[in-house]
Amino acid sequence: MGTTTEVTQELVERLAAASDLVVFTGSGISAESGIPTYRGNLALWAGFRAEELSSVAAFERDPGQVWTWYEERRQQIAKAEPNPAHRAIVDLERAFKGFHLITQNIDGLHQKAGSKDPIELHGSIWRGRCTREHIIVDLTECPLTTLPPVCGRCGAVLRPDVVWFGEALPHGPFEAANLAAAFCGAMIVVGTSAQVMPAASLPLVAKQNGAFVVEVNTEHTAISTLIDETLLGAAGGVLPGLVEKVIRRVESR
Ligand code: BJW
């Protein structure tokens, strides 16, 4: 494992050499858009830890309280704009024939930046799920007029279509993410502490299958010693320069 604060030529070569590239993101990529990370400043809301509100138990106890928390976050996210790191990933998607974006984020900022079809592992704050029929509905209206929102078909309360602790990740996206990780030539991991399983296993799946794995983060993480390289720095500052060099190298071939 190595650590660098600069984009080295070797790093550029290793990434540009990949025929299939995966970018795997966490909440740190949205920090510069003003969205709090999880183990940083989202830690407390009205005296509750985020983990206490992101749970089935909390929702069953008090759906109104959980929705009030989500609605505050929705309104904050609605005002946020993608930052240069989100936009750099769109450029990568255009430059690589084989490309997958896997995100743990529920904020939708990758789509807002122009990413075509990110694999969302932990759901989306812009969708709801019927607690009776389990159908998934778009919930893009912001602010919501009714809290908690209800299903337009059956009238049951909707829950946020996100993955809480103890819940399985959605099968299709998780399967697609595992396949992308297993078959990529390189993976760029951006802004995740890599503490939350099973998502955090994806860089290791890539590494075990021979991919070159680099993380971009403001600090070392749970996987730093297990991957090839840590590029220390803020995603919005580091990623655009890295991506520009990689794309130039790809196009020079
Ligand atoms: C910057 C930056 C800048 C800052 N630039 N970088 C072992 C194996 C399997 C499971 C487990 C296990 N041990 C425990 C578990 C259970 C649990 C788990 O992993 N717990 C750990 C905390 C210990 N996992 C689960 O429960 C999962 N489900 C599961 O395992 O199901 C099993 C099952 C199978 C079959 C049937 C039934 C069950 C589900 C996990 C769901 C996670 N959900 C959340 C909430 C989403 C909804 C919401 O938002 O309300 O997802 S939790 C939260 O963490 C959110 C995130 O996507 C996820 C990851 O967080 P992330 O993005 O890494 O954020 P941070 O804050 O941790 O890190 C930010 C990073 O950015 C830091 O490194 C900063 O340095 C960096 N940064 N600014 C670059 N500008």
Image: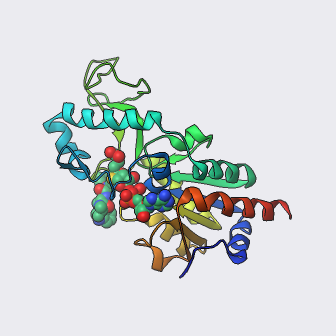
| 146 left or right, relative to 46 | right
| 133 left or right, relative to 115 | left
Q: Nearer the viewer, residue 167 or 91?
A: 91
The answer to whether residue 155 is above or below residue 214 is above
Q: Position of residue 203 (x, y in %)?
A: 50, 67
Q: Position of residue 12 (x, y in %)?
A: 71, 70
Q: Nearer the viewer, residue 253 or 156?
A: 253
Q: Quadrant of the C terminus?
A: bottom right
The answer to whether residue 70 is above or below residue 52 is above
The answer to whether residue 181 is above or below residue 38 is below
Q: Position of residue 75 (x, y in %)?
A: 38, 32
Query: Within the displayed image, which quadrant is ligand 1 positioned in?
Result: bottom left
Q: Nearer the viewer, residue 231 or 54?
A: 231
The answer to whether residue 236 is above or below residue 118 is below
- Residue 192 seen in the current view: no
| Residue plotted at (56% across, 47% down) | 83
Quadrant of residue 235 within the rendered picture: bottom right
Q: Nearer the viewer, residue 26 or 168?
A: 26
| Residue plotted at (36% across, 65% down) | 195
